Image (cartoon, helix red, strand yellow):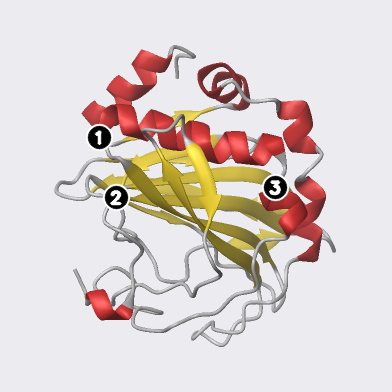
Amino acid sequence: MSSDRSAVIARLAQAGYALLGPADARAVLRLDLAALDQLRDFWERLPRDGYLRDGGAYRARRHSCFVQQTAAGGLLEAVPHRPHWQPTAYNALHGGLTRWFEPIEPALAGAPAWRHLVSAIGELFAQLEPAPRWYVEAHQFRIDTTGGLGRPTPEGAHRDGVDFVAVILIGRRQVRGGETRVFDAHGPTGVRFTMQDPWTLLLMNDARVIHETTPIQPQGAQAARDTLVLTYRARGFQAPEAGAE
């Protein structure tokens, strides 16, 4: 993928997704990768996800919500802690369930490098689809192999019910598998790849593509795959009172 910003926007417009390696992500979004690397320890303190309906214990996570004012220099503001909710139309496994996760630690949510990452991605998406503000949900994930297998997307291939999605690899260790698959939501075409390097970014137009990541298997005692998933929606946060869309 080119490190030219206009090429990334064109790729998103044409294919519905763009994959950026760390060097391209740094150039396109003006990221400070050294500063971001200092934040990876926050993935060591994620509480277990108690809502997994498949009975697994392989996922740990935190979740917080923000509003980004795209017309005000990308100003990013935290909102009072709220649950994560999706309609069953987008998440057949956990849809319709009000899930309260522990919030992202303030030291991470307030870190300049992290705030710049979230805002810069939102500003790029706004160039593709202008919106006065983004309602952003941020999910820290760790998938490990407790029980022998870890499932990054237990709901299978899916859309998220938002406008745009960013999947950011924080790191992976002692695992095999974890292949990411992105398919045209309205046709047979698709791609498959494995995100290997920290700060690899997958950007997606949620209306255009569906995505999933295959299970991981251990290659050592400390097997884990860490990601940050950011979703951007112009019409407010998804909530039960809004109904399934």
Vertical side of 147 occupied by 13: above or below: above
Q: Secondary structure at mark 2?
A: loop
* Residue 194 x/y as whole percent: 54, 41
Look at mark 2 in the image and give the residue it sits on: 234
Task: Give how far apart the Cα atoms at labels 3 and 2 are.
Answer: 23 Å
Q: Can I make out residue 39 in this image? A: yes
Badge 1: residue crowd in 10 Å (few <14, some 14–19, many ≥20): few
Q: Amino acid at mark 1?
A: Glu
Disc marking residue 129: 1
**Residues at badges 2 and 1 in contact (C-beta under 8 Å)?**
yes
Badge 2: residue crowd in 10 Å (few <14, some 14–19, many ≥20): some
Q: Residue furthest left?
A: 186
Left or right for 21, reference 158: right
Residue located 35% across and 72% down the image: 86
Q: Can I make out residue 219 in this image? A: no
> Of label 2 and label 1, which has the lower sequence position?
1
Vertical side of 106 occupied by 206: above or below: above
Based on the displayed image, in which of its 4 quarters is residue 42 positioned? Answer: bottom right
* Of 21 and 192, the residue lying toward us: 21
Residue located 38% across and 22% down the image: 8
Based on the displayed image, in which of its 4 quarters is residue 92 positioned? Answer: bottom left
* Residue 168 x/y as whole percent: 56, 43
> Of label 3 and label 2, which has the lower sequence position?
3
Q: Amino acid at mark 2?
A: Ala
* Residue 4 x/y as whole percent: 44, 11
* Residue 94 x/y as whole percent: 41, 79
Look at mark 3 in the image and give the residue it sits on: 110
**Residues at badges 3 and 1 in contact (C-beta under 8 Å)?**
no
